[in-house]
Image (spheres, rainbow, N blue to C red):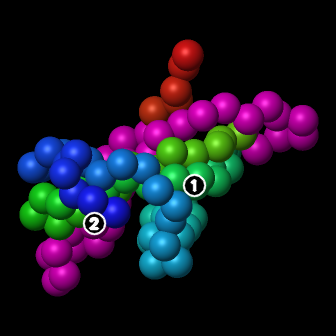
Amino acid sequence: MTTDHLIPGGYTPFRKLTDKEKVLFKTVLDPLVGVDYEAVAVATQVVAGVNLKFFCNASVVKPDSPYYAAMITIFQPLPKQGDAHITGICKINC
C-alpha cells in the first residue's frame, strides 16, 4: 500500500480487519444488547492512541429483522492509559 494519498491526521482507506481488530471489536461490543453488529471493514487514525472506524452490517435482535449499514468508532488509548471504548455508533442513511 502506498501512502501518497494519506492526509496527516486523517483516516486510512477502509480495508479488511486484522485478527487483532476483530478481537478488539468483539471485546468492546460484547456488553451491548439489542443490536447485532458485524464489522465488514475498518479505517484507522493515529492520535494519542488509535481511532478505529468500523463499517458494519447491523440488525435489531428479533426474528426477520432487516440489515442496515452502521459506522462504529472505537478509541484505543495508548498502553496503560485505559481501555478501548466506543465513541460513536451511527446508522448510515442513504
Q: Circle 1 is placed at which residue position?
A: 39
- For the record, the magenta segment spans 60-89
SS for tag 2?
strand
Q: Residue furthest top?
A: 94
Position of residue 36 in the picture relative to residue 88 (left or right): right
Image-quadrant location for residue 51 = bottom left
Of labels 1 and 2, the one closer to you: 1
Q: Amino acid at mark 1?
A: Ala
Residue in view at x 43 percent, y 50 percent: 14
Residue in view at x 22 percent, y 57 percent: 3
Residue in view at x 17 percent, y 83 percent: 80
Quarter of the picture holding the N terminus: bottom left
Q: Amino acid at mark 2?
A: Gln
Q: Work out whether residue 72 can be spotted.
A: yes
Residue 77 drawn at (x, y percent):
20, 68
Q: Residue furthest bottom?
A: 80
Q: Work out whether residue 51 can be spotted.
A: no
Residue 21 drawn at (x, y percent):
45, 70
Local crowd size for mark 2, using a 10 Å CA cut-off: few (<14), some (14–19), many (≥20): many
Residue in view at x 57 percent, y 54 percent: 39
Position of residue 27 in the picture relative to residue 52 (left or right): right
The answer to if 77 sits in the magenta stretch is yes
Residue 5 drawn at (x, y percent):
22, 46
Quarter of the picture holding the C terminus: top right
Q: Is residue 11 above or below residue 47?
A: above
Q: Is residue 11 above or below residue 85?
A: above
Local crowd size for mark 1, using a 10 Å CA cut-off: few (<14), some (14–19), many (≥20): many
Q: Is residue 35 above or below residue 45?
A: above
The answer to if 79 sits in the magenta stretch is yes
State the mark number for residue 76: 2
Q: Residue furthest right?
A: 64
First-in-chain label (1 vs 2): 1
